[in-house]
C-alpha cells in the first residue's frame, strides 16, 4: 500500500509536533467562530430591539398629507378663496446620484430638470444642498407644474430622473381674481424668520402660511393640521402598502363681513373716480381707497384699495421679477392697502368731527352766527376761504357744514386754541383719530396723528417749530396741517356720528372683517362680536345737529356741496366733501357719507372714498360714494351712466 | 534524500494504484459526519437562496435555485470522484497544477469578464459556461503548494526555502489581486501561513515572514502613496476596507450595505422573523443578499438560532478537516487538509464578519451557501479531497 513506507516510522521532523500544531490551529478556528457567535449574540440578543426599531424606520416612510386650507367666504356665502389640486415637483436626495461619486450623472439630471422646469440651475442646486440635510424627506422645487408637459415628461422618462418626485398639493384659487386682494392677502412658503415665531411652532420649513390680509391674521384657523401616512416602501423607495393613515384635518373656513358684490362695486368706483379726475384735468390721479362699514356693528362691508394685485401670483411661487416690478415706484404701491395704510390729510371731511368737539366744548352753539367774508385773519396771518374772494356770508353750524365754510371753522380753531387743555385733540381722539383702529388685518399704520403741543415739542426742528401755535390749531380745524388720517379711521369716526340715536349713544367700533369661523360641516366655531372702544364723549343733541348739517350737504336746503352728486338718489344720504391739500401733490378728493340719513331709520352703511390727487371731493369722490351706495341699495348706477353718456 | 524513508512523492511516483481498497472499505472509510455536515450546509444554503431570491423574478421564483442546482450536481459528482481517487496523485502533478493555475489566472486577466463589476476580470466565459478562476485556482494551489512543502520536508531549517515558498504563493496571489479580488488574495495568504505552520516552519522564520508582510503592507499603504504618489490599493479599496469601522460616515453609498445588513441581522433577534418573512431583504434593502450578504438573510429570518446553527455546521466541517489533517498517514494529506480548513475558516470568518460589521467588506462568498456555482463546485471538490484523505488513512490503518 502506498502509505506503507511512512507507516512504521514517519520522518522525525513531521511526526512529533504536527498533531499539536493542527490541534492549536483547530482551537484558533474555534476561537474565530466563537467571536462570530458572540458578536451575533451581541447584535441580535443584546441590541436586537434597537435594530428592530431601525428596521421599522427603514422600510416605513412617513408621508405628510397636506391639509387643505380653509375656504374663505363673503358674508353671503360666495367663495372668495378656494383650493384646487396642483402638482409639485420635489427632490428625494437619497434616491439621487451622489454629486461626488457620480458627478456626471448628477449634473446631467439637474441640468435636464432645470431646463424642464424652467428654473435657474443655481436655484435647483441650492434646493438640493438644503434637501441633502434630510435625504429621506422630499423637498419641493417647483409648484403648480403643468401636467400635460412637465409631469408627463417626468413620468415617461423616470429613468433619467431618479429621486425626482411628483406630489399632489393644494393650491389657493381665487375665483374672483384680484377682488378684495388686500383683505384676503396671499399664501406663501413660511420664511426662516417666521419659523422662529411662537405662533408657528411645530411647523416645518416648506409649509405654506398666510402672508397678508386675513390669510395671515386667521392663519391658525385656516391652516388645518397635516395628516400623515405610513407607507411601507422597498429599497427603491416605491410604496408597497399603507400601514397607517392619519387623515389631514382641513383648516376651518372663514366667513368675512365683506359683501363681494359691494366690494366689486367699490373697486369699480375707485377706477371710475380716477377716470372722472382725469376728465376734470387732474391727470396725476392714480390711486385711491374706499371703505364701506356697517355703522351698527363695525363690520367692514367693502374695503378697496387701488392699485391692487392678483394674489394668485403667489400660487406656485412668486416670480422674483414680477415681485420687483410690483415694488417699483411706477407701480404705485399695489401691495399697500391704502384703506389702513394710506395716510392723508382729512381736509374738509374733518369738519363734522371738529364741529362736534366744538359744540361739546361749548365754544359755539348750533345757532352761533359767524360771518364769512372770504378770509380769516389772525395776527399777521391770513387764511383764505375756499370761496375767496367771495365768502359765504353769515354762517351757522348747519350751513357751515353744508357749504364747507372754512372761515367758520378757522374761528372754531382759534376759539378752541384758547380752551384749557387740548380740548380739540382729545375730542378728535375720542373718535379714534391718531391711533390704530385695531382692525383684524395686518400691518395697519402706526403713523396716523392728531398733532398737539406735545407732538410739536418732540418733533419740531427749530425752537420756533416746537411751539404749538394758534395757527396750528386753525389748520387742524379744517383737517389740514400736520393731521394724518386713514380712510378706515374716517369710516370708524363717521360711524360713531351715524350710529348715535336716542336709543343708544354714539359708538366707536373696532372695525372687523371676520364674521365667523366654521368647520367643514358648517358648524360655527367662533362668532366675531362687535367690539367698541370708549373715549367718545359728545352729547347726542350736538351729534344730531352735526348729522343735520351733513344731511344738508346732499340736499338743496343749504346749497350743500354734494347736491349735484346725489341728485335723484332715492335714499337720504348725509355726508361731507373734502378737498385736501398735500403739497406738492395735486389736491386729494375725499367724501364721507352714510345712509339712510332721513333721521327716522337707522343708518346702515358708511362709505368713505378718497382719490389721490383727484381734485375736488364734490366732483370726484362724492360720485364714488354714490356708486357704492347705489349698489348697496340696489339702485341702477344712474349717475355714472348719465356721466358716461355725455 | 533520506534513503531509509522514501518520501511520499517517491512512493507515489513508483506505484500507480488507482484504488487500493474494496467498496466496503471505501464506505467504511468515508467520514460520514463530514459528508452529513456538508450536505446539511448545502441544503441550508438552498433554502436561504430561495428566500433571498424568490421575489427577484416574480414569474420564476426558482431561477437562482435552479441555476445553483446545476452547480450542486456537478459539485457532487466531483466530490464522489475525488473521494474515490487517490489524493496523492495530485502531488505528482504539482508543476502542471501550478502552471495550469497561473495560466488560468493570466487568461482571466487578459480575456476575462467582470460581470456586473465593470473593469474587473474575474470570470472566464465560454458559451454559457462561466468559471470564477480564482475559486478553482485557490484549491489547485493548496494541492501544488502541499506537494512543494512535502518535498521540502528536509529543508525546514533553511530560510531560503521559506522565501521560495512565499514567492511561489505570491505570484498567483498578485495575479488574483490584479483581477482585482483582494479577498481571495488574502485567503491565499492565510493558506500560506497555515500550511507553513502545519508543515513545521521554525518560529523565527515565521516571525520574519510576518514582519516582511507587515513591512510590505506599510510600504504599499503609506510609503508608496506619499513618496511616489501611486498606491497599490485603489482609493475605493482602501475606503471599502476601512468603512466597516464607521459605516455611518457614508450612509447612502459605501456604508449603506453595511448598515442595512447589520440592521437586518440585528432585527432578527433570538429566533428571527420566520422563513421568507425578512422584510429587510425582501424589500431589497440589503444588496447582494443572495451572494456575499446571504448571511444577512439567515440572521434576519432565522435569528440567533439560525446563525448559531450555521456557525455550528461550519465548526463541524472545520473540525473534521483538522481531524483528517491529524489522521493522515502522510504529511501531504495533512498539509492539504489543513489548507482546505484554512480556506474554510478564513472565508467563513471574513464573510460573516463583514455581514455583522466586524470585518471589512472583501467580497468573499460564504462557502456552500452563497449563490455562485464556481464556489459551490470547488468547495464540494475540497470536501471530496478531504474524504479521499480520510478513506485512505482509514484504509491504511486497516491494513
Image (spheres, rainbow, N blue to C red):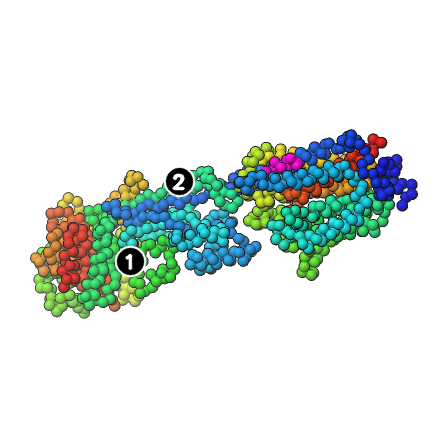
Q: Chain of mark 2?
A: A
Q: Residue furthest front?
A: B127
Range of magenta residues: B41-50
Q: What secondary structure is marked by label 1? A: loop
Q: Which residue lies under the disc numbered 2?
A: A247
Q: Position of residue A478 (x, y in %)?
A: 19, 61
State the CA–CA distance, disc 2 to disc 1. 37 Å
**Does A300 sit above or below residue A642?**
above
Residue A378 in sight from this viewpoint:
yes
The residue sitting at 83% across, 50% down in the picture is B161
At a point 38% along the width and 58% down the height, the residue shown is A319
Observer-nearest of B32 and B340: B32
Is residue B46 shown in magenta? yes
Residue at figure coordinates x 73%, y 32% from the top left: B32
**How many labels sit on residues?**
2
| Mark 1 lies on residue | A308
Amino acid at each position: 500500500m502506498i502509505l506503507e513506507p511512512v507507516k512504521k516510522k514517519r520522518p522525525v521532523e513531521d511526526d512529533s509536533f504536527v498533531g499539536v500544531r493542527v490541534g492549536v490551529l483547530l482551537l484558533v478556528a474555534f476561537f474565530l467562530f466563537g467571536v462570530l457567535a458572540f458578536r451575533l449574540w451581541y447584535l441580535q440578543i443584546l441590541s436586537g430591539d434597537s435594530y428592530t426599531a431601525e428596521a421599522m424606520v427603514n422600510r416605513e416612510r412617513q408621508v405628510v398629507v397636506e391639509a387643505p386650507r380653509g375656504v374663505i367666504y363673503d358674508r353671503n356665502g360666495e367663495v372668495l378663496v378656494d383650493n384646487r389640486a396642483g402638482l409639485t415637483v420635489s427632490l428625494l436626495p437619497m434616491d439621487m446620484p451622489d454629486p461626488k461619486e457620480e458627478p456626471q450623472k448628477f449634473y446631467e439630471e439637474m441640468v435636464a430638470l432645470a431646463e424642464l422646469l424652467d428654473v435657474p440651475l443655481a436655484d435647483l442646486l441650492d434646493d438640493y444642498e438644503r434637501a441633502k440635510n434630510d435625504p429621506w424627506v422630499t423637498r419641493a422645487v417647483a409648484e403648480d407644474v403643468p401636467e400635460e408637459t412637465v409631469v408627463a415628461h417626468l413620468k415617461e422618462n423616470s429613468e433619467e430622473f431618479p429621486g425626482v418626485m411628483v406630489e399632489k398639493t393644494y393650491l389657493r384659487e381665487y375665483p374672483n381674481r384680484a377682488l378684495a386682494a388686500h383683505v384676503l392677502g396671499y399664501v406663501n412658503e413660511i420664511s426662516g424668520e417666521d419659523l422662529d415665531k411662537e405662533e408657528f411652532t411645530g411647523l416645518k420649513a416648506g409649509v405654506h402660511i398666510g402672508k397678508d390680509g386675513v390669510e395671515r391674521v386667521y392663519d391658525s384657523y385656516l391652516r388645518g393640521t397635516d395628516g400623515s401616512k405610513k407607507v411601507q416602501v422597498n429599497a427603491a423607495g416605491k410604496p408597497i402598502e399603507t400601514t397607517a393613515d392619519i387623515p389631514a384635518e382641513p383648516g376651518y373656513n372663514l366667513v368675512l363681513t365683506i359683501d363681494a358684490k359691494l366690494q366689486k362695486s367699490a373697486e369699480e368706483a375707485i377706477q371710475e373716480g380716477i377716470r372722472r379726475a382725469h376728465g376734470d384735468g387732474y391727470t396725476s390721479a392714480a390711486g385711491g381707497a374706499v371703505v364701506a362699514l356697517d355703522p351698527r356693528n363695525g363690520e367692514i362691508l367693502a374695503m378697496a384699495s387701488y392699485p391692487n394685485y392678483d394674489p394668485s401670483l403667489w400660487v406656485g411661487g412668486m416670480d422674483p421679477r414680477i415681485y420687483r416690478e410690483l415694488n417699483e415706484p411706477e407701480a404705485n404701491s399695489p401691495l399697500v392697502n391704502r384703506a389702513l395704510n394710506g395716510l392723508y390729510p382729512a381736509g374738509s371731511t374733518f369738519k363734522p368731527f371738529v364741529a362736534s368737539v366744538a359744540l361739546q366744548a361749548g365754544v359755539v352753539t348750533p345757532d352761533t352766527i359767524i360771518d364769512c367774508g372770504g378770509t380769516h385773519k389772525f395776527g399777521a396771518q391770513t387764511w383764505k376761504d375756499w370761496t375767496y374772494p367771495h365768502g359765504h356770508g353769515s354762517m351757522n353750524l348747519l350751513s357751515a357744514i353744508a357749504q364747507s365754510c372754512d372761515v367758520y371753522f378757522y374761528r372754531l380753531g382759534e376759539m378752541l386754541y384758547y380752551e384749557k387743555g387740548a380740548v380739540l385733540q382729545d375730542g378728535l381722539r375720542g373718535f379714534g383719530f391718531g391711533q390704530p383702529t385695531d382692525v383684524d388685518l395686518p400691518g395697519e399704520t402706526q403713523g396716523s396723528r392728531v398733532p398737539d403741543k406735545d407732538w410739536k415739542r418732540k418733533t419740531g426742528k427749530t425752537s420756533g417749530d416746537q411751539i404749538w401755535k394758534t395757527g396750528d390749531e386753525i389748520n387742524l380745524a379744517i383737517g389740514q396741517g400736520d393731521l394724518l388720517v386713514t380712510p378706515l379711521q374716517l369710516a370708524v369716526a363717521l360711524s360713531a356720528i351715524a350710529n348715535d340715536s336716542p336709543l343708544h349713544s354714539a359708538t366707536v367700533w373696532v372695525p372687523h372683517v371676520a364674521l365667523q369661523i366654521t368647520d367643514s360641516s358648517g358648524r360655527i366655531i367662533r362668532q366675531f362680536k362687535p367690539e367698541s372702544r370708549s373715549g367718545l364723549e359728545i352729547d347726542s343733541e350736538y351729534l344730531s345737529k352735526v348729522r343735520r348739517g351733513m344731511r344738508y350737504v346732499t340736499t338743496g336746503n343749504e346749497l350743500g356741496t354734494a347736491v349735484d352728486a346725489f341728485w335723484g338718489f332715492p335714499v337720504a344720504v348725509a355726508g361731507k366733501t373734502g378737498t385736501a391739500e398735500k403739497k406738492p401733490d395735486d389736491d386729494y378728493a375725499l367724501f364721507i357719507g352714510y345712509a339712510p340719513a332721513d333721521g327716522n331709520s337707522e343708518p346702515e352703511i358708511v362709505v368713505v372714498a378718497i382719490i389721490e390727487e383727484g381734485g375736488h371731493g364734490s366732483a370726484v369722490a362724492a360720485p364714488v360714494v354714490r356708486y357704492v351706495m347705489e349698489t348697496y341699495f340696489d339702485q341702477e348706477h344712474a349717475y355714472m351712466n348719465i356721466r358716461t353718456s355725455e | 534524500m533520506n534513503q531509509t524513508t522514501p518520501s511520499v512523492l517517491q512512493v507515489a511516483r513508483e506505484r500507480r494504484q488507482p484504488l487500493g481498497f474494496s467498496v466496503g472499505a471505501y464506505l467504511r472509510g468515508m467520514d460520514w459526519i463530514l459528508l452529513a455536515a456538508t450536505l446539511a450546509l448545502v441544503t441550508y444554503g438552498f433554502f436561504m437562496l430561495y428566500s433571498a431570491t424568490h421575489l427577484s423574478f416574480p414569474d420564476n421564483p426558482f431561477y437562482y435555485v435552479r441555476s445553483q442546482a446545476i452547480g450542486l450536481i456537478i459539485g457532487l459528482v466531483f466530490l464522489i470522484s475525488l473521494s474515490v481517487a487517490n489524493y496523492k496523485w495530485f502531488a505528482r502533478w504539482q508543476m502542471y497544477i501550478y502552471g495550469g493555475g497561473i495560466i488560468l489566472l493570466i487568461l482571466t486577466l487578459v480575456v476575462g469578464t467582470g460581470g456586473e463589476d465593470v473593469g474587473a476580470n474575474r470570470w472566464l466565459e465560454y458559451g454559457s459556461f462561466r468559471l470564477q478562476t480564482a475559486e478553482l485556482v485557490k484549491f489547485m494551489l493548496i494541492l501544488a503548494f502541499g506537494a512543494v512543502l512535502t518535498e521540502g520536508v528536509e529543508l525546514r531549517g533553511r530560510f531560503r526555502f521559506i522565501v521560495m515558498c512565499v514567492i511561489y504563493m505570491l505570484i498567483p496571489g498578485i495575479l488574483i489581486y490584479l483581477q482585482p479580488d483582494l479577498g481571495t488574495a488574502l485567503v491565499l495568504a492565510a493558506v500560506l501561513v497555515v500550511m507553513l505552520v502545519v508543515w513545521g516552519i521554525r518560529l523565527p522564520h515565521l516571525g520574519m515572514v510576518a514582519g516582511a508582510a507587515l513591512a510590505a503592507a506599510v510600504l504599499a499603504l503609506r510609503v508608496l502613496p506619499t513618496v511616489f504618489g501611486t498606491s497599490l490599493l485603489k482609493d475605493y479599496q482602501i475606503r471599502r476596507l476601512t468603512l466597516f469601522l464607521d459605516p455611518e460616515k457614508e450612509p447612502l453609498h459605501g456604508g449603506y450595505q453595511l448598515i442595512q445588513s447589520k440592521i437586518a441581522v440585528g432585527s432578527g433577534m433570538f429566533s428571527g422573523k420566520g422563513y421568507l418573512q425578512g422584510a429587510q431583504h425582501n424589500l431589497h434593502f440589503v444588496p447582494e443578499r443572495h451572494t456575499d450578504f446571504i448571511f444577512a438573510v439567515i440572521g434576519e429570518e432565522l435569528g440567533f438560532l439560525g446563525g448559531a446553527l450555521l456557525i455550528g455546521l461550519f465548526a463541524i466541517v472545520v473540525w473534521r478537516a483538522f481531524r483528517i489533517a491529524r489522521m493522515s498517514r502522510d504529511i501531504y494529506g495533512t498539509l492539504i487538509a489543513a489548507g482546505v480548513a484554512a480556506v474554510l475558516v478564513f472565508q467563513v470568518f471574513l464573510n460573516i464578519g463583514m455581514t455583522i460589521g466586524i470585518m471589512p467588506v472583501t467580497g468573499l462568498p460564504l462557502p456552500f451557501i452563497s449563490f455562485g456555482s464556481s464556489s459551490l463546485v470547488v468547495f464540494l471538490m475540497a470536501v471530496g479531497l478531504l474524504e479521499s484523505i480520510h478513506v485512505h488513512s482509514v484504509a491504511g490503518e486497516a491494513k
